[in-house]
Amino acid sequence: MRSTDLPTGTVLDEPMVHALLYAAVQEGLLDGDPTIGDGFVRRVMRSPPDQGVLAHALEHVVLSGKVFAPFWLPREWRGELFERELLVPRDPGLDEDLIEAPGLSPALALAMLRARGHRWSQEDLLERYESLMTAYSTLEGAGGPTLEELKIRMALRNVIPIAPEEYSQEQLAAWTATEEAYSAFKPVLDCHNAYRRVLTHSLEVGALSALPLDTMAASLAGLSLAETSADRMLLLRIACKGLRRVPIGTSLRETIAMATSPEGQDLRHRLALWSESVRLNEAESAATVLGDVDAARRSLKNAKSLATIGEYSTYIGVPAAIVGAFVAGPLVTISGVVVSVVGGAVLVGQKLIERMNRWAMYGQN
């Protein structure tokens, strides 16, 4: 996907999707029956989203006009959010079909964990990783089956009892320690799987990825065609700050109205152009955006002045035409019509300026 192309949408990480689903049910944009999906809706509504995660999800609605959920959602779930294809569920597929994505950086891993309610520090992350590696090493040193083989054996122990001589106490202790260390580190592994899922679906539908991608690692892994939302999100925030606007509404419904408005659509086109300019190293992000924002604001200010002049000219012209027709004859009528036409031309100029800079009117009302 070229940067100047409008993305088909943005593939979101699971916490952001759940935040949108929660808000949609609250605002009547999705059916709130808690029994849908064998209690799926009940589970969604049981955990109110972090407001920061929700705000970030709303920004993505504005950024691309449509978001994708790369995991299972109940087919029988109905509502405006799905019917208007503002949020599109994707068949999650099989884990083995996901692309082999580069490993998570500590910063990204911690951010994804935080979005899932795990408030780990970098020291916590390192400690859990080292504990898992130590436990694995001890298990291997104890001899016998691998962790995966032991998992299967333990799962069947009520069907096929474990004989005392089958494993040594050392092996069982090493297995228990490894299982505990694995469980403690599993949230990171789940994050990496979610990362692969987001990138896979992003490439499949030509959408932006809501999760960042390490450029060098991506190139080595053959993921250079993937585009993340980070650059356009930065441009959106710079533009809205320059326009003195908040990029999202106070609710999901209000944000959708802003995102789907003509101004919102034009803003996405402008973001695509800015993104391409920055990608080609033609200018720094803030300079690229703020220069256009200042120019647009000046043009719109001039357009407002033209509107005042045009309305005044038309107001004066119409009475002159009417009076001329009944009192002074054709001469005043022609003069009146001329004044009226000039006023109309000025108003046309004002509308043209506003149309060319409509993106800068985003979130104005």
Image: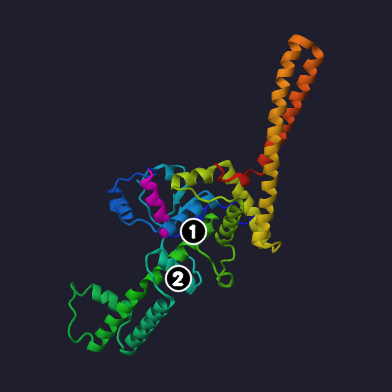
Mark 2 or 1, nearer chain start: 2
Image quadrant holding the C terminus, namely top right
Q: Mark 2: which amino acid? A: Ala
Left or right of residue 146, residue 347 in this image: right
Which one is nearer the viewer's eye here, 107 or 326? Answer: 326
The residue at the far right in this view is 331
Residue count near mark 2 (Cα–Cα under 10 Å), binned few <14, some 14–19, many ≥20: many
Label 2 to label 1: alpha-carbon separation: 19 Å
Check residue 22 for magenta coloring: yes
Q: Is residue 92 visible?
A: no
> For residue 183, which quarter of the picture?
bottom left
Residue with the mark numbered 2 = 109
Q: Mark 1: which amino acid? A: His
Per the picture, the main secondary structure of the magenta-coloured stretch is helix
Checking the image for residue 201, the label placed there is: 1
The span shown in magenta is 14-27
